[in-house]
Image (cartoon, rainbow, N blue to C red):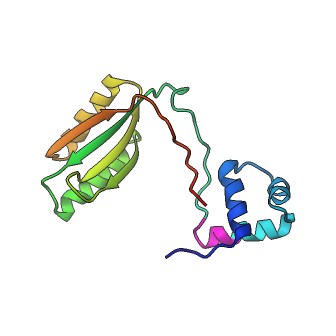
Amino acid sequence: MAVRLDEMDRKILSQLQEDASQSLDEIARKVGSSKTPVWNRIRKMKDMGVIGRQTVLLDAEALGLEACFFVLIRTSEHESDWQRKFLATLRARPEVLEAHRLAGDIDYILKVRVKNARAYDQFYQALIGEVKIHSFTALLSMEEIKTPPLLPL
């Protein structure tokens, strides 16, 4: 269920998405408010679940993770035991940055970040060794065009 936010909440969220390391004073100045009301709104949005954990964005290529693959998975297995094992396997793999269950011909899509093709093959071999997968297609991203984690507010 969507939470109702006013314009000030959206301004604060935009500032936090842009740079969560800003001080409360900086955010308050940029949104045209004072520190205490901004802090109260941030705390309220955390309590409502609008704001989750705060992390730092890292540059994957600077860390040697130069290959990004999108993996399309089809399965002939749809039992809850298989799905539980599959999801646990994905969650345990740090290479899997995102995983989505889809409607349509493809059952799952994964975003996998690794050093190179050899590292991807190791990931692939480990995954198919742990769970039965009917069809597995990997697409190498040649260029990341737009990847900001900012939500449209």
The x and y percentages for residue 58 are 58, 37
- Residue displayed at 16% across by 43% down: 135
Quarter occupied by residue 69:
top left
Residue 10 vs residue 87, the one in the foreground: 10
**Magenta residues, start to end:** 44-50
- Residue displayed at 15% across by 47% down: 132
Residue 123 vs residue 16, the one in the foreground: 16
The x and y percentages for residue 131 are 19, 47
Is 36 positioned to the left or the right of 62 in the image? right
The x and y percentages for residue 77 are 14, 56
Quadrant where the C terminus lies?
A: bottom right
Residue 87 vs residue 19, the one in the foreground: 19
Is 114 positioned to the left or the right of 126 in the image? right
Residue 46 vs residue 32, the one in the foreground: 32
Number of numbered tags placed on the structure image: 0
- Residue displayed at 49% across by 76% down: 1
Image position of 62 with respect to 104: above or below: above
The verdict on residue 149 being magenta is no
Image position of 127 with respect to 25: above or below: above
The x and y percentages for residue 125 are 23, 33
Image position of 60 with respect to 147: above or below: above
Is 49 positioned to the left or the right of 127 in the image? right
- Residue displayed at 31% across by 23% down: 118
